[in-house]
Image (cartoon, rainbow, N blue to C red):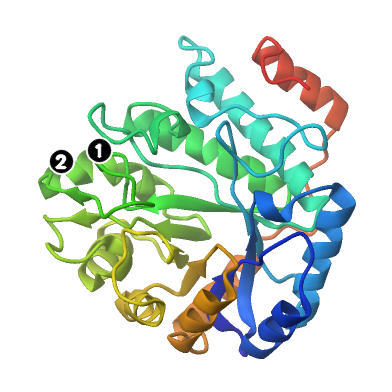
Amino acid sequence: MSTSTAAILGCAGTVLSAEEAAFFRDVRPWGFILFKRNIETPDQVRKLTSALRETVGRPDAPILIDQEGGRVARLQPPHWGKYPPGRAYGELVANDPLVAREITRLGARLIAHDLTSLGINVDCVPVLDVPDPKGHEIIGDRAYGDTPEQVATLGRAAAEGLLAGGVLPIIKHIPGHGRAMADSHLELPVVKAKLAELEARDFAPFRVLSDMPMAMTAHVVYTAIDRRRPATTSKKAIKQVIRGSLGFDGLLMSDDLSMKALSGDFKQRAKDSLSAGCDVVLHCNGDMDEMKAVMAGVGKMSKEARRRAQAVMGRLVKVPEPLDVAEARARFDAAFDGRYAG
């Protein structure tokens, strides 16, 4: 852990190239992330996760994936089960929130089973953004509901299901992407709402789940906090809001540095994110030139980041909660009338 650099990196394909393996051995990132381009079959993914961990010499090195369900699902049939978007859980049984909570937790527990069988131990879930009706559809049905209360309740259920199954959750996109009028993959969103409005709605679920082990920042400018910088690179947003009023003391990672919401070269993006208060930076696309530029701006994890990283890994349960997979999947599919079966 002490020799890890403050980065999470991706790779280009379904197997590691010799260049990638040598690069990862040299720069020793704290973790890795997988995307659809890295996924073919269960055996192939297991070999890839093993190869990634071998490069850094840590058998429990974090390997992340975005497996939300719906339109954000890197693992798909026929090898893996199908899961709904967050909104489907919120709409499940409008008059019985306990049922919605139970099925949300069950879905996450089943996803955890899928992931751990592949050597993946971190899922970029739950989405805690509260969508604004006028906001960009990039969040849309990924959100569990339209109110902070519903998002927080079902978000915690999902996080608990992952943790019970031996997978670490990541709350995202802190402190809230739901009001953004633009897709931060393509441009920088600027939110002009007053701080009191943000605190009451956008930030609220993150405060409720501030005990979670990891969080991913939003590439969003909140003019009430910092008129120039998005949360990812804003010392004010991280110190005053994320670490301050929200009380989050887990490991804070940037969203993907290759997203167009950020400006400057990759070295500067990495330096700005870490100097603002992120513990690690995320670079996803596996482009070697970009990764080299990112790593030019990244050093060893800070003392605080190492402390948080150690605490994060301590949250991984050694023995997952028992699960009868066939029975659980049948119950899950029945809850949705078979819409996500197969």
**CB under 8 Å between discs 2 and 1:** yes
- Of the 4 image quadrants, the one containing the N terminus is bottom right
The circle on residue 253 is: none
Label 2 packing within 10 angstroms: few (<14), some (14-19), many (20+): few
Check disc 2 and give the amino acid type. Answer: Glu
Residue lying furthest right in this view?
43
**x, y percentage for residue 167?**
68, 53
Residue shown at the point (33%, 81%) measured from the top left? 275
Residue shown at the point (46%, 12%) measured from the top left? 94
Residue 89, image quadrant? top right
Distance (Cα) linking label 2 and label 1: 6 Å
Q: Nearer the viewer, residue 14 or 219?
A: 14
Q: Which residue is mark 1?
A: 201
Q: Secondary structure at mark 2?
A: helix
Q: Is residue 238 above or below residue 110?
A: below
In the picture, measured across the screen, residue 190 lies left or right of residue 212, that is left
Residue shown at the point (42%, 37%) measured from the top left? 152
Q: Is residue 282 above or below residue 156?
A: below
**x, y percentage for residue 308?**
51, 73
Q: Which residue is mark 2?
A: 197
Q: Is residue 317 above or below residue 326?
A: below
* Any part of residue 205 in sight: yes
Q: Nearer the viewer, residue 287 or 194?
A: 287
Residue shown at the point (20%, 69%) measured from the top left? 236
Q: Nearer the viewer, residue 206 or 226?
A: 226
In the picture, measured across the screen, residue 265 lies left or right of residue 223, that is right
Residue 288, image quadrant? bottom right
Q: Nearer the viewer, residue 89 or 254?
A: 254
Q: Secondary structure at mark 1?
A: helix
**x, y percentage for residue 217?**
38, 59
Check disc 1 and give the amino acid type. Answer: Arg
